[in-house]
Image (spheres, coloured by chain):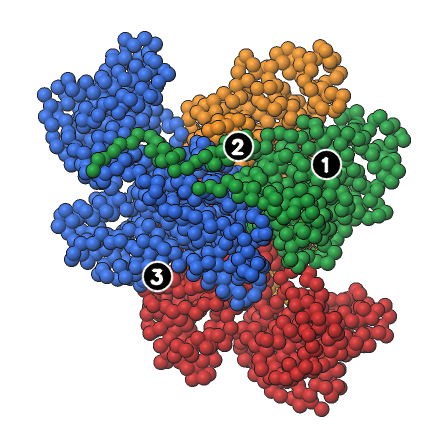
Chain colours: A green, B orange, C blue, D red
Amino acid sequence: MADGARYHASENGSGVATLTKQDFVSGQETRWCPGCGDYAVLAAVQEFLPELGLPLERIVFVTGIGCAGRFAYYMNTYGLHGIHGRAPALATGLAVSRPDLSVWALGGDGDMLSIGGNHLIHALRRNIPIKILVLNNQVYGLTKGQTSPTSELGKVTKSTPFGSEDQPFNPLALALGAGASFVARTVDRDRHHVIEVLRAASEHPGAAFVEIYHNCPIFNDEAYAALTDKDTKDAHQIRLEHGLPIRFGAERERGVARRPDGSLAIVEVADAGEDALLVHDAHRADPSMAFALAHLSQRVSEPTPIGVFRAVERPVHGESSREELEAAHEAIGPGELEALLHGGATWTVES
Amino acid sequence: MADGARYHASENGSGVATLTKQDFVSGQETRWCPGCGDYAVLAAVQEFLPELGLPLERIVFVTGIGCAGRFAYYMNTYGLHGIHGRAPALATGLAVSRPDLSVWALGGDGDMLSIGGNHLIHALRRNIPIKILVLNNQVYGLTKGQTSPTSELGKVTKSTPFGSEDQPFNPLALALGAGASFVARTVDRDRHHVIEVLRAASEHPGAAFVEIYHNCPIFNDEAYAALTDKDTKDAHQIRLEHGLPIRFGAERERGVARRPDGSLAIVEVADAGEDALLVHDAHRADPSMAFALAHLSQRVSEPTPIGVFRAVERPVHGESSREELEAAHEAIGPGELEALLHGGATWTVES
Amino acid sequence: MSRTVDKDRVVIRIAGDSGDGMQLAGGRFTDATAVFGNDLATAPSYPAEVRAPAGTLRGVSAFQIHFASRDILTPGDRPNVLVAMNPAALKSNVDTLESGATIVVNDDAFSKRNLAKAGYDANPLEDGSLSEFRVYRVPMTSMTVKATESIEGVSSRDGARAKNLFALGVLSWMYGRPVEVTEEWIERKFANRGAILTANLAAFHAGYNFGETADLLDVRYRVKPAALRPGTYRNVDGTTATALGLIAASVTSGLPLLFASYPITPASELLHELARQRSLGVRTIQAEDEIAAANMALGAAFGGQLGVTATSGPGMDLKAETIGLAVALELPMVIVDVQRAGPSTGMPTKPESADLLMALYGRHGESPLPVIAAATPAHCFDAALEAVRLAVDYRTPVILLSDAFLANSSEPWLIPNIEDLPRIDPRFAQGPNLDGEFLPYLRDERLARPWAIPGTIGLAHRIGGLEKEDGTGNISYDPENHARMTSLRAEKVRGIARDIAPLEVDHEDGAELLVLGWGSSYGPITAGARRVRERGGKVAAAHLFHLNPLPANTGEVLRSYRRVLVAETNTGQLSQIVRAEFLVDAESFTKLEGKPLLAAELEREILERL
Amino acid sequence: MSRTVDKDRVVIRIAGDSGDGMQLAGGRFTDATAVFGNDLATAPSYPAEVRAPAGTLRGVSAFQIHFASRDILTPGDRPNVLVAMNPAALKSNVDTLESGATIVVNDDAFSKRNLAKAGYDANPLEDGSLSEFRVYRVPMTSMTVKATESIEGVSSRDGARAKNLFALGVLSWMYGRPVEVTEEWIERKFANRGAILTANLAAFHAGYNFGETADLLDVRYRVKPAALRPGTYRNVDGTTATALGLIAASVTSGLPLLFASYPITPASELLHELARQRSLGVRTIQAEDEIAAANMALGAAFGGQLGVTATSGPGMDLKAETIGLAVALELPMVIVDVQRAGPSTGMPTKPESADLLMALYGRHGESPLPVIAAATPAHCFDAALEAVRLAVDYRTPVILLSDAFLANSSEPWLIPNIEDLPRIDPRFAQGPNLDGEFLPYLRDERLARPWAIPGTIGLAHRIGGLEKEDGTGNISYDPENHARMTSLRAEKVRGIARDIAPLEVDHEDGAELLVLGWGSSYGPITAGARRVRERGGKVAAAHLFHLNPLPANTGEVLRSYRRVLVAETNTGQLSQIVRAEFLVDAESFTKLEGKPLLAAELEREILERL
Ligand SMILES: Cc1ncc(C[n+]2csc(CCOP(=O)(O)OP(=O)(O)O)c2C)c(N)n1
Ligand SMILES: Cc1ncc(C[n+]2csc(CCOP(=O)(O)OP(=O)(O)O)c2C)c(N)n1
Ligand code: SF4
Ligand code: SF4
Ligand SMILES: [Mg+2]
Ligand SMILES: [Mg+2]
């Protein structure tokens, strides 16, 4: 018979209250290249997780294949390192059947957007209760430097020696187009921001899509330098904060406003006036504004919004059936099974 | 050696000038259910094709599996009935290697958006020169009535007897999110409109995404009734026309305008004034307005925009290398091959 | 007055347009037959298209039932009786009839137009072309209309629609089926639809009474109840039996069932069947594709659930990589392959059992796993339970092979006692397993590894598809470790041979020929062999339920016969396996027509070899 | 003064940190060796990670070359010479050396820190643990720095970086390699980088002169040029050879090459290689996944192009359904599988040949296709051409099996004359083929169907994965037609046996044991058998280049030996095939260590069986 209790076995488990970053570090030696942005993301995730207030046994990292995919091994949680591109599907099976767990699906830009693109958009559409982290370095790291679906047009890589012929995905736009209920972006070198975004994602009841720009010093070094270098950072990071007018720059001297034709533009606050600035509303039901913000910059060399673009509540897959299923599973026993087997027209042959 | 000429073999082929609808009807008996919307779409396509001005031998229909997928058999063109979901990938291989052809990829909502979703979004991102027709009946027809990725939340089907738990895709939004350069929607019962949209798609130099609402009288009857019924049609069809203010209704008494917060709303023209109406601009580089229009209606029972949402030019996959490749292929012969084989360091062993 | 003839067994086929309700009539006849106590087997056949034009050959839907006063094994090769509701139904079935068969036609439907639609130049009822048959012309439509015309709220169109129940009435009379079973069903089914209920009852009675009173039908047949094993029975098709087996496994193991699948004929029915069982704790997901479905099932397995996915051939191709991952992860998982005729899209509605080698080898690298095949519709129940048992006990994906024939055919099923079901114990890891540490790849005596599920304190661990160090499960590129792990994985699966029933032989003294089968060839082989024996031939038969590993005694059995004949609906896949494994010069009887084997074909093949 | 010793063959391994430029030094040594006229074979080995920490065992990169004054077949089992640029390189390679081997170390790198990183407690150069070897301690770093310090614009760090060229210089001196070859290469490579060019040349010369002048190195070896077949040679690895073969096939057939692929180790290199060949008319696409890649290649094939896709194990799983479609469509297409160690993600960089059964059976339904396996790096050229020839002539997908070993290893390749390449004629359909009609499935004498490509007037037709009517290609559910088409598809592939070379045996009078191989086991089996013969043993060897169909005489050959030993890096897949096909009791020698077979292992296995 089902041991319903095991779902809650760890409730008073590993001393939740006192968990620290170190508790989330697994014994395995990290094997990324020196200087890889994945280290920073890993550290931020480990630093953030104690906040969840969950015993580490209730957290699962499901990853795909790629440098980023190695993540699973470095977390002292349950971890499932799947095959290339399928992490969202593995995570879906796990999350809908084990709603007591905190399930994180993580992969690279190739893993999640190239081979895994379909699972990603369907998980978002379905609003599966998983947190999806896409570690975007705009290149294939593990396979040593081919173009990825986020590599820019004209990019020269091993597989595109004459330059890529393809326009890259705008991952946030794709997620919004798929109907994502939560969409955010952050960048590896800004640990506090990463943690803020992780927090928001973890608080979101459905599928949360988080793009994390991260640097691959080996195959695509400094792709996000404008966003992270001390000198250029302020001028490039447009931090979205719900309820606040969108301003940025060292002196917060620039901002985002709507043009008369409805499109968004970057303006000088001094010229446009504070009132002209767009007030960021992540909770708007219509995703169109978030979509427009996602298109504000075409290249990371331009001022680029980061933060939570969208966070709206809508039915979470599995929620509506959850209680019925759990109750059913608790209740079912030999009697119910007997009744099931004897369903339909039966007849008896006497001995 | 390559017979470069064969690409053009049919230039003066089947009497292009005089092709008629009937020339595009294959001998095979159509095997859709009586009343299926696919018949209307087929007829419209066959009626439209002579306009292309191409000999029928230069046209190829590549289809997936599903009722819609049978399309390939009914067209007196070259036809490739692939496997489930892969038509965009098959068509990609064909179109990039044979730019002299007019390649159409066609499939149902399940074929193109469920199993084939990834190929679809990548073909759109890459701007492959193919015309993609998604015949959306919001259900799985061929497999006899399961939910599809466009079935509405709560939909009861054979696979969802308690109602679907998933929000459907907004196919246009997904296509826009993927970076599609051409996005349109039409509806089976309006032959003229279908043809108009096909014409626009065929004139578009890159990937054209066309959603065609069509009725499945067997498993999802009258899903689009509001859009097609005589009585309700005018009140529900919002026809988008580039350069014109967006108006609809029997008396064109309603229209689409922008709210102060930037979102779109349906207004009474009398109240809002003509000048307040949104002038449709399909050529706008930023896809955000098209995206907002795609979200104007959440259900087909609401007024729903049809027509060309977006049509912008951007680099077509394969164009930049096309000439070089063709020239190379024309030029290459034993001498070039010899040079290639002898590339790198060689040495000779004397006899 | 009609005379009554005793018969051992009868094969009836009811055919009509797909709108004529033939499956319903067949199903009702089956229920009555089952309750009456005959052994039986049924097989439906549907048009390939969703809605083919009415009256055409393509639009014919048929239902065949074989019932007998003794146990039977197949839905029958050649019907003795055909009920044809229109000319197309007659035309597309007449060739399959045994010579001298009885044909009952709905005379009203033999209009010029319908004859033309069916491609008849002349009316076959009148041109003598049916002279080898005994033909009864019954104006079923008009008689049904007449029987229902006085019922208020029932138009003559409504009435005509009930003609399938009229036909059912006729057949019920001819074979002395208990009428109450059908009456009760009609009453239940149309409980809230007054006039329709009355009309259907009236049509049924009219048909029955027509037999009783009309002089036309001059024979009745009596097929005595069969002496079946005592117990409670129900009629099940392979789809239902599989669903019940999976649910039973879920209940007895305590593992909640997560069934993820992508629709595909003929596997979709299993999804439909299970989707309705929410109240039994079954969760189903219609995934975006087969790859996702397999991964969802595997993800659930990681979480400690019974993860199951089902598909047919093309979908199996897509699941291969994920199944390989499950082999590496050593997690329990069941993959049901309802085989259909290939290659590629092939003939989606037609049965064929040609996925065996794919089940065994259809993944890159060395990735062995257990493969089980269901033999009959009812056996799908046991096969599903066995698949789960092996998956859970050995922490391995298991492929369960069924096929389009088994999925749709039905037969009586002796409902087992719950206590007799195999015990399946998940044996979740509860704590450290070596010196206070937890080693996720430390194996037990079956070579199975611990199943430690998220939520279990102290057992957090990380596993994946990269080669793993023996014991710890850490990533390892060590050459000897890889050799060891490869052989441990193989050894684990091979070891299952100790844990399954030996190959049983239905032997006959003096038999030198053994007929070996797997999957749905069970019925025709057993029936074929029986017929040979009835004719005095000596033959042995054996059936493989486990295809990997093979039962431990398989080689011994095969080598003890002078000749071995393997019968299968593929080009000789099992034959190839036993030849390679045991170096026996197995012969093949193969058939690739998108149809099940027939007992008569087996009879012929065996006789040729005696 | 050093003495000069003659040697028949030498195996050298150069190992260092992955940042140390070992592959470059190895490549240069190989070029000089090739130009010198030795026969040779090489094998690189890389760290599994993109960038492992410097100085660690995981970070070691190595290059092995075997060269000889006669023809050789493998990169060698146990090196006679190891150049170790740091302690980790020494530690991770010392176990593979033959006893008495020469070790040249970069003495400067044996610092405390580096020793610790490599996991040495004590300095192995000093603790006597290397006593069975002849060890030379050369302070390579400091000598390189010294040699380059006077060059303007070259820091001592830059100088130190050139130490691989110093090592190359030492080796060039030891084995009398022609210096001009390396000098020219350096000059070409660093043509526009003045100071770096000078530094590299200086480092190389310093190493060479160190050998010449230092007393330390007391022996020089002379390996005379081999008497190779006359002609022009170049050194190729399997990846390059495959790429050249595909391009040659494209040129000779006139079919533009469309290569669609998704990156995966070790197949990605083929994509990289072909992507550079745009000027030769090669179009490459990096697809979104392996399924798309296969479909793109197939779509191109429909359009009359040479559609090729390549991948490794996991990607093969994903392509299965599309390959099945190609079988049904009967369109030419080549699928290259660069096998690697599985199951699942396995050990991506390690060789293993365990995808044979998957290539044969890894699709649902009956979907036979030709399977070819390359035997050596250079043979990849012929194998690729042969794959295209069969694909085009028989209108069928062909699977070409290579592996991680072949892809990366290199050997001299006798460049063929263009005129000697096989003719491949697409034979596009040009018009109606039966009474003014075009039947897309009307077959020729090879049972191949016409290839009618879009653009051809009057031949517009429609084909798909549903079962097709013989001749017309229209959808057909007819049972007999399905049986016929199934057997036609099988017959077509079986018939290829008439069109391929028979199995050749390297026989020796009196031999009772035949060693049979396929794929990259060619080298070790042939070398192993040669060694056995040198020791007086009698053994025959044969190698299968075609795995489906097998050459027509295979059964005859196998049956003519008392014992057959099949050697392969899997659990016995070819063995299983020949057992089933020919009922010979083939024995297996298998190895699953993610490493190629070694000649010595074969020698041992053969000797045990004589
Ligand atoms: C089915 C399959 N195809 C291809 C691969 C090879 N592969 C491994 S990781 C990877 C992509 C890596 O890029 P990304 O996802 O961006 O991750 P990163 O390494 O950049 O973090 C590929 C193609 C694979 N393991 N499995
Ligand atoms: C790999 C694979 N999976 C599943 C199927 C079964 N299948 C055929 S068509 C179809 C979906 C049909 O729905 P849709 O694409 O919406 O087309 P429609 O029939 O509604 O026109 C499915 C699931 C298949 N043929 N191949
Ligand atoms: S290759 Fe790039 S992404 Fe991968 S570990 Fe190295 S730095 Fe990080
Ligand atoms: S099932 Fe629906 S979509 Fe399919 S042919 Fe019938 S009506 Fe058309
Ligand atoms: Mg990446
Ligand atoms: Mg549909």
Q: Do the residues labelled 2 and 1 touch (CB within 8 Å)?
A: no
Looking at the image, which residue is at 37% across and 64% down?
D578
Residue C277 in which image quadrant = top left
Looking at the image, which residue is at 72% across and 81% down?
D137
Residue D112 in which image quadrant = bottom right
Looking at the image, which residue is at 41% across and 47% down?
C424
> Is residue A44 in view?
yes
Give, as a three-letter code, the residue at label 2.
Answer: Glu
Disc 3 is attached to a residue of which chain?
Answer: C
* Residue D47: x %, y % from top left: 64, 64
Q: Kindly indicate whether the residues beneath marks 1 and 3 are on one polypeptide chain.
A: no
* Residue C557: x %, y % from top left: 26, 59
Whole-angstrom CA distance, mark 2 to mark 1, is 31 Å
Q: Kindly indicate whether the residues beneath marks 3 and 2 are on one polypeptide chain.
A: no
Whole-angstrom CA distance, mark 1 to mark 3, is 61 Å
Q: Kindly indicate whether the residues beneath marks 2 and 1 are on one polypeptide chain.
A: yes
Does residue C554 lie above or below B119 as drawn? below
The residue tagged with tag 3: helix, strand or loop?
A: helix
Please identify the quadrant where the N terminus of chain D is shown: bottom right
Disc on res. A308: 1
Mark 3 nearby-residue class (10 Å; few <14, some 14–19, many ≥20): many
In the rendered image, which residue does mark 3 sit on?
C580
Mark 2 nearby-residue class (10 Å; few <14, some 14–19, many ≥20): few
* Residue B93: x %, y % from top left: 56, 45
